[in-house]
Image (cartoon, helix red, strand yellow):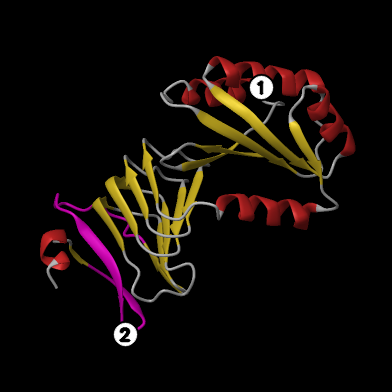
Amino acid sequence: MKLILRNSNNDFIKSISFAKFEAYQNFISELSSIKEPVEAHLFTANERITSNELAKLKFHLKQLNIKFSDIYSNNRETVLSGKSLKINSSLLNNKKNINKSFLDNQSQKKDILHKGTIRSGDRISSNGDLFIMGDVNPGAIVSANNNVYVWGKLLGTAFAGENGNKNASIASLWLNPIQLRICEIIAIGPKEKPKHQYPEIAILEAKKIIIKPYEPIRDCNK
């Protein structure tokens, strides 16, 4: 199941599981760093979640000043459990409709600013530009219809130009990704760590992804 956490600045998408106690505890621990009001939207397919499990999640979210806003599921018992706790719960016919609702929910925001590290297994996306003030760890995925800017280490996977924007770019203070993709063009990251320590930007040229030093002030004056 996936949880979208939404505040005025960004969307954060997190996979959670009630079956793995340690993973759930780590998830709650990560949320403790949130300082401003947030809404949570739960999307789950083919999973039966009991009222006790949802009550536990609702309690922990409330302790962190996070409002449990919605549940979208194709499991009737999960929806009934949500309604019994006075959580707005919608029964969808199949997984396809859940995925559509998930994407529609994300599309409410355009440019996104995310503050903090994106950890392995996490994914965050934007319908405009995506700005990340923190590291993107191996196993994490970040994507945007336009540009991706990582003011930290980009060690995971980054996709830019998801809507076909060939002028999209991926920039980072430390660019050492597992994989980059701009539009339909894919590049695999280098095996060796970069020896230099300056910002770099990945762009499309002649249907290839090339990497060059990033000079944002000069670029802005073009």
Q: Is residue 138 magenta?
A: no
Q: Sequence order check: which comes first, mark 2 or mark 1?
A: 1
For residue 162, above or below residue 9: below
Q: Nearer the viewer, residue 63 or 16?
A: 63
Instruction: Measuring from the top left, give residue 86's x and y in whole percent.
Output: 77, 25
Q: Is residue 155 left or right of residue 18?
A: left
Instruction: Measuring from the top left, give residue 53's x and y in whole percent.
Output: 75, 21
Residue range corresponding to the magenta coloring: 189-211
What residue is drawn where x is 16% and y is 67%? 219
| Picture disc at residue 108 | none
Q: Are marks 2 and 1 in contact (CB under 8 Å)?
A: no
Q: Nearer the viewer, residue 206 or 13?
A: 13
Q: Is residue 199 magenta?
A: yes
Image quadrant of residue 61?
Answer: top right
What residue is drawn where x is 89% and y is 38%? 76
Q: Is residue 161 left or right of residue 69?
A: left
For the C terminus, the quadrant is bottom left
Q: Is residue 154 left or right of residue 160?
A: left
Q: Secondary structure at mark 1?
A: helix
Q: Which residue is mark 2?
A: 206
User: Which residue extends farthest right?
Assistant: 76
Q: Which residue is mark 1?
A: 57
What residue is drawn where x is 45% and y is 57%? 143
